[in-house]
Amino acid sequence: MTSADIIIIGGGIAGMSAAYFLAQKGKKVIVLEREDQPGYHCTGRSAALYSETYGPKIIRKMSTASRSFFLTPPEGFTDHPILTPRGMLIMAMPGEETQLDELLTEGRANGADVQALTPDQIGELIPIIDTRQFIGGALEPAAMDIDVHALHWGFIRQFKKMNGTIVTRAHVAKMEKTGDNWVVTTHRNDQFTAPVVVNAAGAWVDEVACAANVAPLGITPKRRTAVMVDLPAGINAEKWPMTATIEEGLYFKPDAGRLLVSPADATPTTPQDIQPEELDVAITIDRLMTMTNLNVGRPGESWAGLRSFFADGDPVSGFDTNKKGFYWLAGQGGYGIQTAPAMGEFAACMICGEDIPERMKQLGITQDALSPARPGLAAQTTEPAS
């Protein structure tokens, strides 16, 4: 049996960012990853963007709290910048004036450079948009593309340098509380023990909870589709920002001379190696052609990933109130990349019994907002069968 201070289940961006910050605090950490390599599911299929105006309120705050790490990562973390210029444009239709005003006001209050655009200005920036459908937009010029591989493997490399351990092909079969410690047994009968277990298993977090006889929180994995689309000859989209509708019905961004397009679908499914559905691809193309003057004859390659949500749409980071030493870190809902530095640091502080950094407090980030016992989740929990 291998012992540690903390066992983290899941080697995606959530688990590895927490592992990195915990190792920095001198903790002996073991990460158990069910796949052949970390980040196979959601992390490895994300077309990530760093934006301080996109997503639910707690996500926007966590994104702002992550800004300094992205801009000035620790020495040796990566060989090249994690962020590269892109920009983010969010467009509003008639009836969405209030949402647009709130987005502009909050973004500016948090220190983000957010500019109001008229429909004509939107058309000048992105000529393919049918501007007759929109009343305006919010442009965040400082939004950046995130090099997901550089970020994820930066955490992994630095974690290993601090003597952290990652065990792959370690599917958790059973978890038991023995005295003050958890004993985690994998499907190969390898055993690991620690006083704290961090459940960062993404779409599988409720399954992991049940294996530990911990009440699940009601996470729902949801399918997200992406499709590559060719642009007509003569159109250079290289400097276009990532563009989305304010109700998140569609977004697209330039990618190697083409467009990466998604309907921002969130179809409930089961934890699995998810694949795209033909209907979702068709919906993607239909929405793109409705919003623009493009005529897409044949879409390019497509893929799907899992985005996991709790009932209220916000992530969870906190100890379970009924099972000592069981920590929930999940439900980032597709925003896990852009919030990873702050979410990882927040979790490490909570696990070690430390206060969160002052910059997080100033943004209004609280333990209650991320608690697994918050009211929005309480009605969803049920005790597992004995």
Image (cartoon, rainbow, N blue to C red):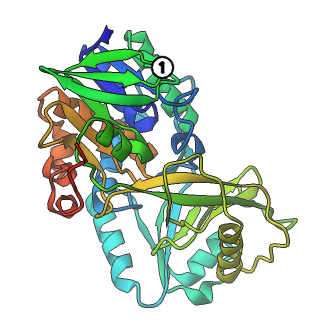
Q: Position of residue 104 (x, y in %)?
A: 35, 70
Residue 248 x %, y %: 49, 70
The image shows a total of numbered marks equal to 1
Image quadrant in which the N terminus is located: top left
Residue 76 visible in rendering: no
Q: Which residue occupies 56% across, 23% down?
A: 79
Question: Badge 1: few (under 14), some or many (20 or more) residues near its Cα, within 10 Å?
Answer: few
Q: Is residue 162 left or right of residue 235?
A: left
The relative height of residue 188 versus residue 290 in the rendered view (above or below) is above
Q: Quadrant of residue 96?
A: bottom left
Q: Residue at point 28% right, 64% down?
A: 312
Asked whether residue 271 is in view, the answer is yes
The quadrant the C terminus occupies is top left
- Residue extending farthest front: 386
Q: Which residue shows up at 51% across the image and 81% down it? A: 118
Looking at the picture, which amino acid does disc 1 mark? Arg
Nearer the observer, 230 or 124: 230
Picture layout, residue 322 above or below residue 257: above
Residue 286 or 260: which is nearer the viewer?
286
Q: Residue at x 61, y 84 (%)?
A: 131
Mark 1 falls on what kind of element? loop
Query: Is 342 above or below relative to 283?
Result: above
Q: Is residue 180 left or right of residue 190?
A: left
Return the residue at label 1: 188
Residue 212 position within the rendered picture, expressed as x and y whole percent measured from the top left:
27, 35
Provide residue 280's location: percent of width, then percent of height: 65, 68
